[in-house]
Image (cartoon, helix red, strand yellow):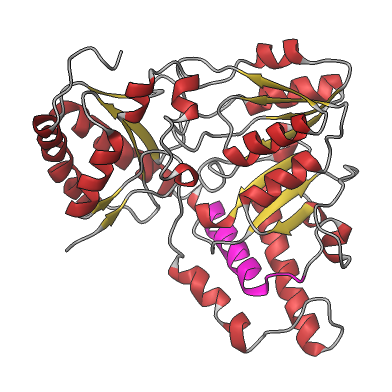
Amino acid sequence: MRRVYMDANATTPLLPEVLDAMRPYFIEHFGNASSIHQQGQHARAAVEHARAAVAALINCRPAEIVFTSGGTESDNLALFGLVQPGDHLITSSIEHHAVLHAAEKLRDRGAEVTFLPVSSEGVIDPGDVRRAIQPNTRLISVMMANNETGAIQPVSEIGRIATEADIYFHTDAVQAAGKLPIDVQTLRCDLLSISGHKMHAPQGTGILYVRRGTRLEPLFFGGSHERQRRAGTENLPGIVGLGKAAEIARTALVDGTMDRVATLRNRLEEGVLAEVESAGVNGIGAPRVSNTTNIYFEDLEGEALVIALDLKGLSVSGGSACASGATEPSHVLTAMGLSPAKARASVRFSLTKQTTEDDIDFALGIIPAAARRLRELAPVNAGTLG
């Protein structure tokens, strides 16, 4: 059976060039980057080359890049590394759980936390950020692009607000890296998180950008790795892969690749809406990353459609992969004002750089029929999804 993958916001496959770059560092060049012998120094050179490649992707100094195990660790390091009991944290109601749950834990430990609302399009109002600032506000953390809807947040405006108020600003750029140009100088952020496996690097890799002069309390204690910001022997093959993926992502931002992906996403979106009654796009009015659409199908369960499409060879998602199996509706969609039923009727389609016109044809050939079949099998009273 042919299989088509449209769940890139959950994870992406390694690009062949990334695997080729990593391969020698599993067996031939296996040294510990902290060792002073030849093998160790060869490993150190590879790590620093990758560090420079990631720094170039976001326009920062290589020394400001901290390698981590992924987006979750990077988000946790940013929040727990700065916010202490008695401090105030501002974040949004649509953050990834790596930020939301960290914020809740900080609240349990004595910090104050403000969870800001979003519009019906899933976008935060910078004015709400300004109004939420208190004398003890230590950190503002707002994602750059939402993982479920793709909605791009006004992080440049929020960065200006944070700078004017002399408050640290962190942005989770996991779903933006490789899809949007990122310049930490323009954003005025102090910390920024990236996860490798969302941009065709291996799972278990990531970075936290830490602006020079920002003092973080580390999460791990041991060696003096990563300038004492993240103890633990570096994941050499993974870091090399992340560096190569960053180089490829930087090229894709200027060679038309992401414009092509956006055209494919729009064709998929328009085709579904033309063929499926009572369907619509969540957050359609907001600026979105080029690869993501979140579509609701009234009078059916989104998870049932995900399973039906999977049986036909199309891999999509009901929302964040981290919430797989959850019975609660998406916190992102309900924060946008969707009813629980409508949130559960929503499906996310997220394309990769490798998605083709034929893949879109394949998807459009099965989605309408699958939706109609599910409605025939499990009719629901009209109006229940308002």
Which image quadrant: the N terminus? bottom left
| Left/right of residue 282 with respect to residue 29 in the rendered view | left
> Between residues 218 and 187, which one lies in front from this camera angle?
218
Which image quadrant: the C terminus? top left
Residue at (76, 80) in percent of width and height: 32
Residue at (79, 16) in percent of width and height: 133
Q: Quadrant of residue 290?
A: top left
Position of residue 211 measured from the top left corner of the image (x, y, whole percent): 82, 43
Residue 32 in the image: above or below residue 301: below
Residue 128: tell me if it is visible: yes
Residue at (53, 21) in percent of width and height: 123
Residue 343 in the image: above or below residue 54: above
Residue at (16, 35) in percent of width and height: 371
**Residue 336 shown in magenta:** no
Position of residue 181 measured from the top left corner of the image (x, y, whole percent): 58, 41
Residue 95 in the image: above or below residue 249: above
Residue 186: tell me if it is visible: no
| Left/right of residue 169 with respect to residue 382 in the rendered view | right
Residue 211 in the image: above or below residue 232: above
Magenta segment, prevailing SS (helix, strand or loop): helix
Q: Quadrant of residue 174?
A: top right
Position of residue 53 measured from the top left corner of the image (x, y, whole percent): 66, 60
**Residue 245 shown in magenta:** yes
Position of residue 48 measured from the top left corner of the image (x, y, whole percent): 75, 67
Magenta-colored span: 233-251
Total numbered circles: 0
